[in-house]
Each structure stands twice: as structure tokens, then as C-alpha cells.
Amino acid sequence: MKSLMVLAAETANEATVVNEFEQTLLRVFILIIMFGLGAGLTVKDFTLALRRPWGLAVGWVAQFGIMPLTSYVLIVAVLLPFSPPEGVLFIALGALIMGSVPAGTTSNLFTYFSKGNVALSVTMTVNSTLWAFIMTPLALWAYSNLLGLDESLSVPPGELATVIVGLIIPVGIGMLIRKLSANIGSLIELIGSVFGLLFIPFLIAVWVPRNWQLLLDTQWPTYVVAIGIGAVGMAAAYGMSKLLRLHPANARTIALEAGINNGPLAIAVIVAVYIDSPGLDQILLVPALYSLFIVLLSTVVTLIFRRANLAAEQKIPNLL
Amino acid sequence: MTARPWLAHYSSEVPHDLPEFPYQNLAELIRDGSGTYAKTKAFTQVMANGMNGSLTYSQVDQYSDKFAAYLRETLGLKQGDRVAVQMPNCLSYTIVAFGILKAGLVLVNTNPLYTATEMIHQFSDSGAKALVVIDMFADRLPEVLPKTSIEHVVTVRISQFLPPMVAGVIRITQKFWSRTLPKIKVPHTPFMDALVAGGKALSKDKLAAYLSGVNRDSVAALQYTGGTTGVSKGAMLSHGNLVLNTLQLIAMCGDYMRPGKEVVVTALPLYHIFAFTINLLGFWHMGARNLLVPTPRPPSNLRRVFENYKVTWMTGVNTLFNALLNERWFTDSPPKHLRASAAGGMALHESVSENWRKVTGTPIVEGYGLTESSPVLTFNPLNGGGKDGTIGIPVPSTLVKLVDENGSEVPLGEPGELLASGPQIMLGYWNRPEETAATVSGGWLKTGDIATADSDGYFTIVDRKKDMILVSGFNVYPNEVEEQIAAVAGVLEVGVIGVPDERSGEKVKAFIVSGATRPTAAEVISYCREHLAAYKVPSLVEYVDELPKSPIGKILRRELRAQEIASMSNKRG
């Protein structure tokens, strides 16, 4: 339990699992990546995403319907029956919060690499983050009641605003730059994707050594929940999109967008609300594990999606 | 004199015949363009990710002067010497091609994807003394050069003339990421060095001297063709052929091609005669901005072209238009400024042209021609007078007739071989008098295509003479069968050939590339039964992953037949 305490102490201080320097570095990374994503987009891409609100609606259902439900089912089916009773409800609470928060910017990056619809992804992130103000507390309240927890929390609007501003501004500037110069735009896009590629090993390198003991101490049911939220959520969102016959690029987008929740936001919310709770370290457990495994999971899913995209790409004869 | 019923369908501004030869040679046409549109952007090379670079009319003019001087002064080439050029669409291509023409030399366009054997054939057959090649494909040279007469090699970078930062990134990507820069193991001169050397040697008098005696009857290009019929041979296209064909096609476009205002997508390779004459020469003459796409494969490579530029014109082949119509980004936001599109190279399917008009809201018309005719012979009028499924009417100063096996004209409506005469018909095949005599006689070019005519003078290609299938004595034209099968839901592409049959002599076989939902063979056959006479209905249907195609996307029935016969004899053996 020592490492958990360390984690809790650190997160309590830094509101995350990383330190100040790494935090800044990560922010710079995300800023550059978002610039790059913006530089690949045009206004038309967004008007198209809005003109077909179907994708957005399906995404919304996946985000606030499928994801919290997935967490709840995993808690009831795996976590509660197979974990030692001590502190398990705290872990369950963390899992519920993880499942109820909106999508983060990481999903935009993976959508880009998956050849998905980046404009839809960005629009979905903004949309779900706005809705989070109502939907996250609502989902948490409903499912924690079912668990007999009667938890209520509010998501600090400042946190949500930060996510949205941090997304819209760099993407908007990226788009503007491309409009002014296609050359600089494509250079920025390229730089953004290089940083995106570095981002994944960077996250892992920061996370794993520090939480090694945590990985050893965690019980298997917790793993199942922390990994399952993303995996089952993605699969269910993808299945639903396919069932509704959405365009493959949009189905990929919605799967990633729904499955990848905003880990840092979940951690920040927990720290803000439960800072004085004796179970803080257990509440943080699933969000912390999720934040690592979702990156690994998304990488695998992205590789699969890329392959599918390549296979579906039009083969025309060589005109060269 | 052959009747010209089509003249009634020319729009008022289209002349029936071209005026007196306006330029002595292509160099004069090129200089006329650069004089009129000096500061205008002539060419913009657009990479798949949107990276781009441009050259103005006067830049292209100056650089190509320098390159002409390099070829004549530094390399010491003599008027009429052949220079082979082997590169995809890029800014350098335009300078190289114009430089060769200004130097009074002969351009030998070469497909960059040729194998070593094909390169050896083309270089030695043409007797090329110099080769300008893209560095990405220079790895085959050690094997090729000793078997040819090539003495000098100039290498070009795809990133040439792009802004330095962008060029640097492309270079690094090529070197370390895509690894498309092989080590060049033969002595060679980088293109920029050649331009510097040419710039030093350049003088106005010399430039004029290079062209002394170069007139409309001088050979400008050896354009290799016949890959579909057998041995590849060089069609000798004269300065007059190319200048006049350029003016002929421009005349047919009338007001749709506005001087100094058009932005045209050049996704077809410039080494092919279609894009060479129409995009490079035609749109240059009209002061257009030419968007050069190095490769439209996959078609998503064209996305940034359409997103970043106000495209007004597009040329392409059926395959390319069809591919774009199957791209969601294209149909979601079709180009707003598009005015017209021209298709050639192969039959434009009616379903594709209809769909293109529906999606873009602009006309698309089909033209027809051969490498041997520089290439345009016929074109559909753009102003609403076009007829889908036809190749249109002959361009100004051009005569077309349909003849039977004895060479006499067939009655109206009957199929016959299409013969054409006009100022765009080649001088002949390079060093092949026999084949020339078999193809051009008395000024008439035998196209080997079977066509029908209607009373308005519109022609419809029924098929290639040699692709015709003979089923129990009935002629079956594969195009007609393909057109029907292409309309079956789930069919992406189709190729139809005749296969030997003991009972009927030949029987019809269809090779189908299907989409996600594959129609059954029975469905295809029953659809054909509804739409075709019984003897035309395929008796065999085979599903394949890919059809053999020529560089511009024509389905190669010859290859299909060869494969089929090989597999049949395998089965027997």
C-alpha cells in the first residue's frame, strides 16, 4: 500500500500522476499535437460534422450511455464478487467516475492516426465536455445509488473550460495557419504527428517506473475493470456505430472517442472532491491504471484500424 | 471529300478549320504563353499532404532556356538528337520538356515505372543520347545504360523548386522514412547544376540558332505506344502536330477555357500524350495554373488539391473520375469553382458521367484520340450539345470516316473502322516504315477502333477491332457487355473477353472486381439476359481481386486473354 500512498500524495499535490516539469512538458506536447491536428483540418470538415449530427448523437450516447454502464457492469460482475471487501467500494467509486467523465484530447490524436474523422472527433470532445457539466454528475449519481453509495459530486466548470479552451484555440490557430499557407500548415501537421508518436512512449516512460509497485500490488479484478472500461466501451461503441451503418471512418472515430476518457480530468475531479477522504488512494486507483492502459489499448486498436483503412482504400491502377 | 455533318454542331465561336499555321514550332507557342502571362503562376506541384511549390510563366521560360543551352552547349547535343525524360508530374518536368523543345531536340517521354527491359527497348529504339530521370528511379541505370546509346544522365529531385524548408522535409522523409532514394551508381549531373551550367552558356543568338530550320514538319517528340498491340514503337509527333492539336482542342472548348483564369488539376501523368497535349500545352497556351499531382494513387492524394485550390478544370480517365466519385470527401464537398471536365484515354462510362454531373453540377465530356494523332481527334461540345456514350464530333480541320474491310465507307449507323485525317496525324513510326505504311496511308490514320456514326456526325466507339468476340458468327463488342455489367450493384470493375469454345468458336467471359457486396454470377448473368441479346450474355463469370491495366488505367483485355489461356492450358496439362 505504500506506493499507493505515494501516488495519492503526489496526485494530491500535483493533481496528476506526473510532476510539475512533466506536467508542463505534457501540456506543450498536447499543444503541439493539437496545432498539428488543426493544421490538417478545414472549416468545411466541421460544417460537415455538424451537418450530419447523427454521428455526434451516436457519440453522445456512447459517451454517456455506454461508458458509465460499462463501468457499472464491470464493477458488479467482476470487481465486487472477486475482490477482498476492504476498500473495494472506493475502487468502485473511482471506476464509476472514470466511466462518467467526458473524452479527452488523446482521443483526437488516436483518431488522427487511425485515419478517422478528426473534425468529428474534436467536435465530439467539445460536445461531451460541455455536456459533462450535467451528465457526469448525473451518471455518477444514478450508478452510485445502484451500488448503495449515494455519491454526488460536481465537476468544477473551470476544469471543463480548460479542456475546451485548450482544444479549440490550438486547433483554430492550426486551421488558420493552413488557410494562410498550405506549406506551413503541412509542416505543422507533420511536426504534430511526430510529437504524437513520441507522446505515447513518453507517457509510458513517465508512468511505469513510478508506479511499478502499484502494478504489482493491484488485484486482478481491478485490472479487469481499469482495462475493461476502455476495451468494452470501445467495442460497444464501435458495434453500435456499425449497426447504425455509420461511415467506417466515423465508426472508428466514435469508438476511440467513447473509449478514451479524459483520465487527467477524472483525477483532477477526484482530488478536488475527495481530498479529505480516507479512501482517496483507492478512489484514484482505477483512473490511474486506466490512464496507462488506455494508451496501450488505443495503440493496438489504432494499428488494427489503420490496417482496416488501408484494406478499404480504393485501389486504382497506376496512373504514375 | 468526306461530308462533315458535325460542323452544324460547333458552337458559333468554333472555327470549322484552323487558321494558317500560327507558330513555326512549339518553342514559339511556349514563348507566346510566357510573354503574355509572365507573372502568372503556371505550375503548382501539390504533394499528398498539401506541401507545394510554384513556378511562374516567366520562371519556366527562363529555366527552360537555360536547360536548352545546357543540352546544346554543355552536352553538345545536335539538332534532332533525342532526349529521354522519365519522371512523374513535377515542376522540373515542365522545364525539362520545354527546354528540350526549345533546344531543337526530340523529347522521348518515358514511363518512370518501366522495367529495365522496357527502358532498354525504348532508349535504344529511340537512340536517345541523354536521359533526364527522377532520382527515385535511377537505381536501374547501371543495368540499362550499357545497352543503350545514352551518354549523359541528369537527375531530378521531386522536391525541386519547392520552398527550402518543405523541400528539406520531403528529402529527409524520402531518405529515412519511405527510403525511396536509391544510391545512383552511374555518373550523373544534378538538375540544378545543369541549369547553372546552361545559364552560363546561354545567349539569345544561340537560342535562336537551336531552332533554325525547326518547322511544323520537324519531329518534336517520339511518343511510344503500342504497348497494347505488341512491340512498343515511337510515334513521330511533329511540332506542327502538337501545336495544331493544342489549338484544335482549345477551339472545341470555346468559352469554357477562359484565358488567364483557369486552374486545372493534372493528375494524369504528363509523359502520356493526353495530359501532355491537353494539360501541359493546352492550358499553358491559355495562361492557366496547372496543379501537378505526382501521383493520384490512392485517390485520397487529391484531397488537398481540391481543398486548397479553386479548381476550375479537370482532365482524367474514367477510372479517375469514378475513383473520385467513390471518395466521401469528394462527394461531401465537390469543387465549388469547377467549370468543366474532360475525359479521354478510355471509354467514359455513362453511369460515371451522369454521376459526375450530378455531384459537381458541371459538364463532363468525352474526347477521343490516339497517341498517333497527338492525341485529340474528336471531342464532345461542352455547351450542352454533347452526347453521352459518344466520343463526340471531330475537332476543327479534322475528317473522320468509317470503313469496312475493303476500305469503302459503311452506310450510316453501321459499324466500321474509324479512319481520321488532319494536321494532328503523326509523321509515322520512328524507323518502322512497314508499320507506318500499315497504319497511315494517303493521310488517313487507321485507328483500329470500330465505331458507328449518327446523322449528326457524332461517333460512338463500339470496340477495338482486335477485341471483338466472335460468338457463332455474331460480333460481340466487349465494351457493350462491360457497360451493362458495370451497372449491376456491387460491381466495381469489369473486363470482358472472348475465350475459345468448341461449340460457338468463342464464348463471352466476364472478369469482375466486386465491392463489399458481391453479386452472384447468376445475378450478373440474369441482368445481362434482360439487357443484352442472348449471344452477348457472358457464359462465364469469374471474380478477381484486380484487373490488369495499362499505365493510364485502361483494362488490358490482351493480358486477361493471355492469363486465361495460360490457366486453361495449365488445367489441361
Image: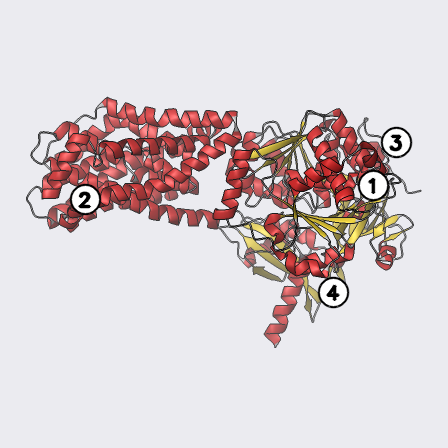
- Measure how far apart labels 3 and 4 are at the Cα level: 50 Å
- Which of the two labelled residues, at mark 3 and mark 4, occupies the earlier sequence position? 3
**Relative to A274, residue B194 above or below:** below
In-image side of B484 versus B106 (left or right): left
**Relative to B13, residue B487 above or below:** below
- Label 1 amino acid? His
In-image side of A33 versus B443 (left or right): left
Residue at mark 3 shares a chain with residue at mark 4: yes
* Residue that carries the numbered disc 2 in the rendered image: A211
x, y percentage for residue B47? 56, 38
- Label 4 amino acid? Ser
- Measure how far apart labels 1 and 4 are at the Cα level: 47 Å
* Residue that carries the numbered disc 1 in the rendered image: B239
Tell me the element at label 3.
loop
Q: The disc numbered 2 marks a residue on which chain?
A: A
- Which of the two labelled residues, at mark 1 and mark 4, occupies the earlier sequence position? 1
**Relative to B417, residue A17 above or below:** above
What is the number of the mark on residue B19?
3
- Label 3 amino acid? Pro
- Measure how far apart labels 3 and 2 are at the Cα level: 84 Å
**Image quarter in which the N terminus of chain B is found:** top right
In-image side of B565 versus A15 (left or right): right
- Measure how far apart labels 1 and 2 are at the Cα level: 76 Å
The colour scheme of the drawn protein is: secondary structure
* Residue that carries the numbered disc 4 in the rendered image: B472
Tell me the element at label 2.
loop
Q: Which residue occupies 53% across, 35% down?
A: B166
Q: The disc numbered 1 marks a residue on which chain?
A: B
Q: The disc numbered 4 marks a residue on which chain?
A: B
Q: In front: mark 1 or mark 4?
A: 1
Q: In front: mark 3 or mark 2?
A: 2
